[in-house]
Image: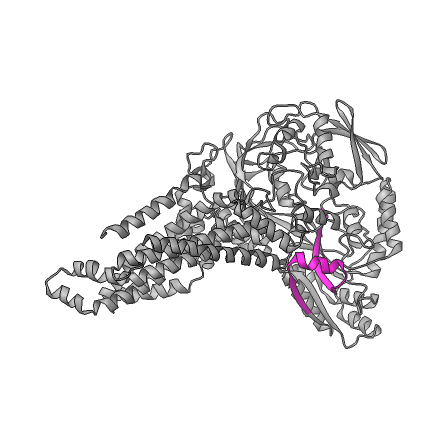
């Protein structure tokens, strides 16, 4: 009995240690990933054929099934294994990928010619059947193994996909939809035969026709990919064309900003994204790290509930626009990593009305307008926002206090706030909306058309609705431009928003990373990225 | 003893049932809708409703609870709403990682803590004692999160000796287990010190010394054996602290354990995974407590459970 305590302890340790073989902490003998190679010093990584690029992402991903999510970071990972009919350049220009060319014979009909010699990772040829299957699986009710794809909405009025001949597929729309091409990079082609074999297991065993094939990993730990040697080469408009230079790619999920930055500086990862502006100086001081930026596509704005007094008075809304010094916010909170906007559209987007000048910071004019509207003594205003945006909301609140509005900030969980916004129960919200197509259609329609899905300002203007609807079905580029010009003017004058800014995407890499720059839609595609 | 253990294990059943019910309602009372989070900010109401139906979140709470309990009895914790993978496999791939981290931290804490505590007590008021207790005070006061970042900054970024984050090799284990061990080490060393000091004043220690035993034998065989009881209690209690600490440590060091899984799942309102993970932690907690009680009896013959 005397020795028993120690025996028991030893027994406990032995029993618990028995768990370890199932652990996700793989030892280095795993042939697919040699961690030491990356971990010790990235500069030691063999140059040329055999190196690994590690990317630190700011969140875990939701799935590896291209049809079953609605998330940018998830798409970034999937996009390295799957290609689409078309893709975007880092500057947001649509270029062919699996589709070699396309034709738009009628406003509601698009014909895509499929490139020859495109192979899936299992060696089979990618055919028009696969393209049709991919889109049927997304747009059909219950077509995704009994469920309906959450990406259906990203294909708007797409009604059917038909096979014309063995190289051509036809997209048939219910009504004209000028942003079809701009939305197509978001869909990736899957193999019909493979999917029919594995079903929903595609979420853990993905297989596409992209530059990298899946090796191992889970969506909340890390994803390891390796080069697909039979890759057709990718878009000819995005040279170099051919198999990826990197032998392996690892996506690590690092939600903590400081962890991400330390891992980059320590050399554990080669590329990180979502770098907050206040970390830029630290990174720039490190000779082994390069910070890169690109204009983002996320419009940040304050949406005012135009149904609720006193914000139902356009003079009050304009006064608030004059009272918030957006330049100061961009300079001091975003440390300059952003661009203010005059109206509701992205500064580098399609159909920007350049006649509109920013309201500008003019507190005297703001007080004048408030007095005119009968609110010389101000009023109480609550600005709702999410935790990560609170700094800007607080700054705006203090600027509004300067003209006599008793503004305060309330921080919410998005899932709770959203319902109240749609129900018109809140006064003013500071948030953002992604517009990666750079087309006004998927910004103005959801945000400002009467009762649309993101219309938090409750703005309802039949005149604007008519313009937006006309632009949705207009096919001529010039016609769309002139419709959107007029729409922007109406929105500018009615001021349902405090027109805000577009933040820059700030990403950083080790200085030995070659041929990589951030994309305006924040995707990280590693097909062409190398190390030296 | 066997009867006692069986009785304790049976008592654990209602406790676990209570935990299950409590967690079930707590996650659902937390504001936030998993369907909204899953659908993304730009989704339409119809798309969100669709997800709600698919996750059975449109059902009344008691129906959801019934379904959950029915499956639970069959050992099925459901599927993650985020990844659609079975919760048991999600948890069981993560749990060993947390366990390895906790055990390493616990081993460090016990070894370093007890050794420092004993030396401090034996050499009371010496420089070593003062320094050790001062460091221990700092250790207790240091937030794990901050300490983790400091370790990372120094050993990974500045010195480049150890990987900053992730898992895969034994090197990845060093920084997170040190960060996690700091608070328990400090607490254990202070506890050991005071406990040993108290025992050293007892008559039987004087007797032991007077019969000519070497000082080492007095300390290790006579003093420490009696002083260790309160230390065992503290070590047991620290298991709870370690679990809490593991959540933070795993987030900082990107360690793929249960703690990080819980944080991710709570943020995504992934109810089934949160429920499963908390249930597992409750089981571990009950197990550790039982183990501590058994150890009492083994170390101290005066304690009998029969």
Q: Is residue B16 above or below residue A91?
A: below
In x, y percent, where is residue B276?
Answer: 52, 50
| Residue A295 in magenta stretch | no
| Res. B248 in view | no
In the depicted structure, whether residue A228 falls above or below residue A380: above
Residue farthest toward the bottom in the current orientation of the protein: A377
Q: Nearer the viewer, residue A527 or B67?
A: B67
* Along the viewing direction, whichever of B95 and A313 lies nearer the viewer: B95
- Res B139 quadrant in image: bottom left
Q: Is residue B73 left or right of residue B111?
A: right
Along the viewing direction, whichever of B261 and A448 lies nearer the viewer: B261
* Residue A424 part of the magenta segment: yes
Span shown in magenta: A408-435
Q: Residue at x 83, y 65 (%)?
A: A314
Residue A346, position as x, y percentages in the image: 74, 51
| Above/below status of A126 relative to A531 | above
- Residue B49 seen in the figure: yes
Q: Of residues A304 and B56, which is closer to you in this image?
A: B56
Left-right relation of B9 to A168:
left
Question: Residue A424: x, y in percent?
Answer: 77, 61
Q: Is residue B168 left or right of residue A474?
A: left
């Amino acid at each position: 009995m005397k020795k028993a305590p120690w025996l028991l302890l030893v027994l406990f340790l032995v029993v618990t240690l028995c768990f370890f073989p199932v652990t996700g902490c793989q030892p280095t003998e795993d042939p697919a990933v040699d961690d030491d190679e990356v971990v010790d010093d990235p500069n030691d990584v063999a140059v040329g054929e055999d190196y690994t690029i590690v990317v630190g992402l700011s969140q875990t991903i939701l799935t590896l099934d291209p049809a079953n999510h609605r998330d940018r970071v998830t798409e970034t990972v999937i996009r390295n294994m799957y290609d689409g009919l078309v893709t975007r350049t880092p500057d947001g220009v649509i270029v062919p990928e699996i589709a070699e060319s396309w034709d738009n014979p009628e406003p509601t009909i698009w014909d895509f010619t499929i490139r020859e010699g495109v192979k899936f990772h299992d060696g089979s040829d990618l055919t028009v059947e696969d393209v049709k299957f991919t889109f049927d699986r997304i747009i059909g009710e219950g077509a995704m193994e009994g469920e309906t794809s959450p990406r259906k909405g990203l294909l708007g009025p797409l009604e059917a996909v038909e096979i014309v001949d063995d190289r051509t597929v036809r997209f048939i729309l219910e009504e004209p939809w000028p942003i079809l091409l701009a939305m197509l990079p978001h869909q990736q082609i899957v193999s019909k035969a493979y999917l029919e074999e594995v079903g929903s297991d595609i979420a853990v065993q993905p297989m596409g026709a992209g530059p990298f094939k899946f090796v191992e990993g889970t969506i909340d730990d890390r994803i390891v990919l390796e080069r697909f040697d039979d890759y057709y080469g990718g878009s000819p408009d995005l040279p170099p064309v051919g198999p990826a230079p990197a032998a392996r790619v690892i996506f690590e999920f690092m939600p903590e900003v400081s962890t991400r930055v330390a891992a980059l500086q320590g050399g554990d990862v080669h590329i990180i994204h979502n770098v907050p502006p206040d970390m830029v100086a630290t990174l720039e001081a490190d000779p082994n790290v390069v910070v890169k930026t690109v204009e983002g596509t996320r419009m940040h704005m304050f949406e005012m509930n135009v149904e609720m007094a006193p914000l139902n008075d356009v003079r009050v809304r304009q006064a608030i626009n004059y009272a918030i010094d957006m330049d100061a916010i961009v300079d001091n909170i975003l440390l300059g990593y952003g661009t203010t906007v005059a109206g509701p559209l992205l500064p580098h987007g399609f159909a920007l009305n350049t006649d509109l000048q920013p309201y500008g910071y003019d507190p005297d004019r703001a007080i004048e307008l408030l007095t005119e509207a009968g609110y010389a003594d101000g009023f109480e205003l609550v600005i709702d926002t999410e935790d990560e945006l609170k700094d800007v909301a607080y700054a705006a609140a203090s600027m509004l206090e300067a003209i006599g509005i008793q503004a305060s900030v309330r921080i919410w969980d998005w899932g709770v706030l959203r319902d109240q916004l749609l129900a018109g129960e809140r006064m003013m919200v500071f948030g953002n909306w992604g517009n990666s197509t750079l087309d006004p259609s998927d910004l103005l329609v959801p945000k400002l058309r009467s009762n649309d899905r993101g219309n938090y300002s409750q703005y309802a203007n039949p005149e604007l609705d008519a313009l937006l609807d006309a632009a949705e079905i207009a096919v001529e580029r010039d016609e769309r431009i002139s419709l959107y010009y007029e729409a922007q003017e109406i929105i500018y004058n009615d001021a349902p928003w405090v027109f805000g800014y577009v933040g820059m995407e700030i990403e950083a890499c080790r200085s030995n990373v070659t041929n990589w720059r951030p994309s305006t839609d924040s995707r990280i595609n590693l097909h062409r990225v190398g190390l030296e | 003893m066997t009867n006692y253990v069986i009785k304790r294990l049976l008592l654990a059943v209602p406790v676990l049932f209570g935990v299950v019910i409590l967690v079930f309602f707590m996650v659902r009372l937390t504001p936030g809708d998993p369907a909204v989070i899953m659908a993304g900010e730009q989704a339409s109401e119809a798309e969100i409703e669709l997800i709600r139906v698919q996750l059975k979140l449109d059902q009344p709470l008691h129906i959801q609870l019934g379904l959950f309990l029915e499956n639970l009895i069959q050992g099925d914790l459901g599927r993650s709403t985020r990844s659609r993978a079975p919760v048991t496999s999600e948890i069981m791939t993560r749990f060993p990682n947390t366990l390895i981290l906790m055990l390493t931290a616990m081993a460090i804490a016990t070894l370093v803590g007890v050794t420092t505590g004993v030396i401090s007590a034996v050499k009371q008021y010496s420089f070593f004692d003062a320094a050790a207790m001062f460091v221990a005070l700092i250790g207790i006061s240091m937030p794990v999160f901050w300490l983790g970042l400091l370790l990372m900054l120094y050993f990974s970024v500045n010195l480049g000796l150890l990987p900053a984050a992730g898992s895969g090799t034994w090197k990845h284990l060093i920084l997170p287990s040190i960060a996690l061990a700091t608070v328990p080490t400090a607490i254990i060393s202070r506890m050991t010190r005071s406990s040993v000091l108290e025992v050293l004043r007892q008559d039987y220690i004087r007797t032991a010394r007077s019969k000519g035993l070497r000082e080492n034998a007095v300390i290790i065989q006579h003093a420490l054996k009696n002083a260790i009881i309160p230390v065992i209690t503290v070590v047991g209690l620290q298991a709870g602290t370690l679990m809490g600490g593991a959540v933070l440590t795993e987030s900082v060091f990107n360690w793929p354990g249960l703690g990080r899984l819980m944080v991710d799942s709570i943020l995504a309102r992934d109810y089934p995974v949160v429920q499963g993970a908390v249930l597992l932690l409750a089981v571990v907690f009950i197990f550790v407590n039982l183990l501590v009680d058994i150890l009492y009896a083994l170390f101290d013959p005066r304690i009998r459970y029969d």
